[in-house]
Amino acid sequence: MSEAVLEINDLSLAFPISRSLADWVAGRPGKVVRALNGVSLQLQKGETLGVVGESGCGKSTLARCIVRLYEPTSGSVRHHGQDIFDASVRGDRAYNRRVQMMFQDPFSSLNPRMTTGQILSEALRVHEMRSEDQIPERVAELLDLVRLPQDAAEKLPHEFSGGQRQRIAIARALAVEPEILIADELVSALDVSVQAQVVNLLLELQERLGLTVLFVAHDLRLVRHVSNRVAVIYLGRIVEIGDSETLFSSPSHPYSQALLSAAPSMDPDDKGQKVKLEGELPSPLNVPTGCAFHQRCRFADTRCHSESPSLRPLEGRGEVACHHVEKILHNA
Ligand code: SF4
């Protein structure tokens, strides 16, 4: 049986936003952005879990909660059973080392005045990964690991291409020998050919080093390529989670069906029937009652307007949050 390295339970996050003058004059309370609404999932050792959904659905917020950049309003994130927001472990640097995040734009996270060698050495020093005399050798190993030439150590971030900068970001994350990598739109800003190289490098390193990866991306083809399991998020809720191949070949939730149907197929001969995703994503300032997807769902009935569906297991598939999924699949 696989081992959960991270357990997320009923995680919610609401950002209060400052009251407008009109609200203040009318005595109305300030508004709240409900970015996450009861997310529960487990990250299993050695797997890659893809997280997909439209822009603004809460994918990146979830990733940022996991690395404690945001504090949830309620719920918990447990790392090997220990709540990472518990006051007694809050200052624990070991967690920061074990869980490393890589961002879409490494330019903003790589110090422009430090060479690659200095960036990697700093990571090794801060977490005391090597003694001072061992650092140059480890920097050379890390450059090899991400297939950058040794003279990269002497260069500044602006002297590299976007793909090479992402390799530096990966090397910096690996410097501290993490257990979990959180890749937030890691390759979204890169050309397609470079995307493939960086993603394949990540997959190779994952296998070689036994890493667990949370891969957040809006590119569904990429997520399918890298993920063992996939979680589909809609307005801060998981609506479907399951094995990647099953979910991509036969999605169950009406939102997953529409989202996947809207994505370009990898098969040029695919003439499959398209399910149109109607309307816009509602604002997280005003999350619909009941099933948050009901305004865009062609199967919605009165129950969907008032009752929020829970995520529940579906035989032969993963878990799905839809009152009528059995009927929908039966009639498909
Ligand atoms: Fe559609 Fe209702 Fe299912 Fe939500 S619960 S996805 S509105 S059928």
Image (cartoon, rainbow, N blue to C red):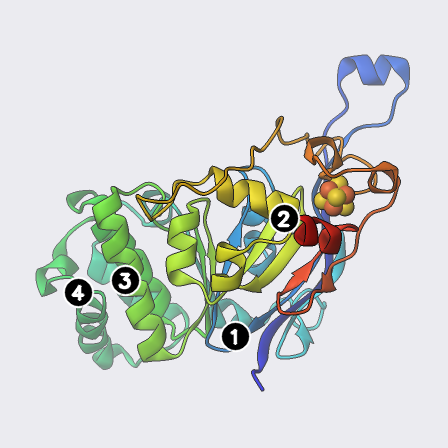
Does the rendering let one see residue 134?
yes
Q: CA distance from mark 2 to mark 3?
A: 36 Å
Amino acid type, callout 2: Ala
CB within 8 Å, label 4 to label 3:
no
Classify 10 Å Cα crowding around label 2: few (below 14), some (14-19), many (20 and above): few
Q: Above or below — where is 94 with respect to 38?
A: below
Q: CA distance from mark 4 to mark 2?
A: 47 Å
Upstream in sequence: badge 2 or badge 3: 3
Q: CA distance from mark 3 to mark 1?
A: 28 Å
Q: Which residue is mark 2?
A: 332
Q: Which residue is mark 3?
A: 200
Q: Which residue is mark 4?
A: 147
Classify 10 Å Cα crowding around label 1: few (below 14), some (14-19), many (20 and above): few
Nearer to us of marks 2 and 3 is: 2
Amino acid type, callout 3: Asn
User: Furthest-front residue in view?
Assistant: 331
Classify 10 Å Cα crowding around label 4: few (below 14), some (14-19), many (20 and above): some
Label 1: element kind: helix
Label 3: element kind: helix
Upstream in sequence: badge 4 or badge 3: 4
Name the residue nearer the viewer: 244 or 115: 244
Upstream in sequence: badge 4 or badge 2: 4
Using the rendered view, name the quadrant where residue 278 is placed: top right
Nearer to us of marks 1 and 4 is: 4
Amino acid type, callout 4: Arg
Q: Which residue is mark 1?
A: 94
